[in-house]
Image: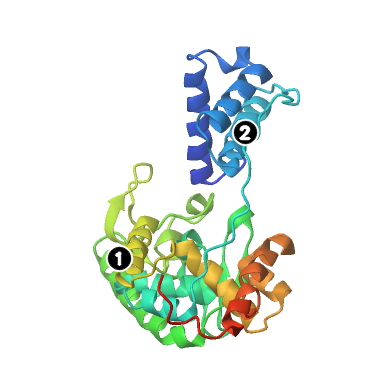
Amino acid sequence: MQLRHFSVRTQETYLGWMRRFHEFNGGRDPARLGAEQVTAFLNMLATQGRVAAATQNQALAALLFLYRAVLEIELPWLDDLVRAKRPEHLPVVLTRAEVTAVLGQFEGQPRLMATLLYGCGLRLLECCHLRVKDVDFGRHQITVRRGKGGKDRMTMLPRSLEGQLAAHLEWVAAQHREDLAAGAGFVELPDALGRKLPNAGRDWAWQWVFPATRLYTCGVTGQRRRHHLHETVVQNAMRRAVLAAGISKRATCHTLRHSFATHLLEDGSDIRTVQELLGHKDVATTMIYTHVLNRGPAGVISPVDRLGGLGGGRS
């Protein structure tokens, strides 16, 4: 998986499914198993585990990689596989007033990060992985590196946030100077860049826009590094903010991205432009937001609203 440049998260996820498959089959050698055992495991996930379709597909991808790429065994088509049903859920979207109420409950770095999720349409990990060099104040844009599917893309940098972000980066720069003075100041670099340019990890351009609060020592290089702020910090802050704002919707950090897309379409933005800003491969994925626009069900007048004398009745 490392040879194929799989992300660390993908490696961990695939290894987790391989372990579960190994345990499900009593610890037997996977090379001596085949399509029958793979089918049984995936059917168990769908019927007994009642996992989502995406989860079953993830497990299938991990096992196909194990057999095809590692064991070099080609599995015949899994004819008896019971596929988990993929429900068609509409995304949860906040109104502009609800977004304002929720963002008002945040503090510190999570507040700026949550505002960028809504203002730029970022995924949470995309925001966590931003580096200083990815922010272009002159062109008012942010470069998202290795988004979903390993793709780079450009999105806007809201001008109303530029002052806050610039002030935040001044604070990050001061912290970085302190780290350098203490013999630290390194960050993790992608792929083999750390071996090609050993000191690049201390350069200002490669620093995280949203750094963690503590340093750690890399077990491989011995460098004293600073990681980016962990995503759970923002997720927990979002959970508290939604409760404090009195929002009854099941809103998460990803809801801010859904709201970004929906509000752009409400304002008349071209759907192809929104597709590019979100980084969707297919415009059909972006089309889901057209189902939650205000000019949909919310833009139709119910016949009961045309009747008189019903407002004061008893329930």
Q: Residue at x 41, y 87 (%)?
A: 163
Quadrant for the N terminus, please. top right
- Sequence-wise, which precedes: disc 1 or disc 2? 2
Q: Looking at the image, do the residues carrying marks 1 and 2 touch, with CB atoms under 8 Å apart?
A: no
- Report the residue marked by disc 1: 180
Residue type of the residue flagged with mark 1: Leu
- Report the residue marked by disc 2: 60
Q: Residue at x 62, y 33 (%)?
A: 60
Residue type of the residue flagged with mark 2: Leu
Relative placement, left or right, of 256 versus 173 is: right
The Cα–Cα distance between marks 1 and 2, rounded to whole angstroms, is: 45 Å
Quadrant for the C terminus, please. bottom left
Q: Residue at x 71, y 24 (%)?
A: 80
Image x and y of residue 157, in percent: 53, 80
Regarding residue 28, the answer to whether it shows in the image is yes
Image x and y of residue 249, in percent: 44, 65
Q: Residues within 10 Å of mark 1 (few under 14, many from 20)?
A: some
Regarding residue 129, the answer to whether it shows in the image is no
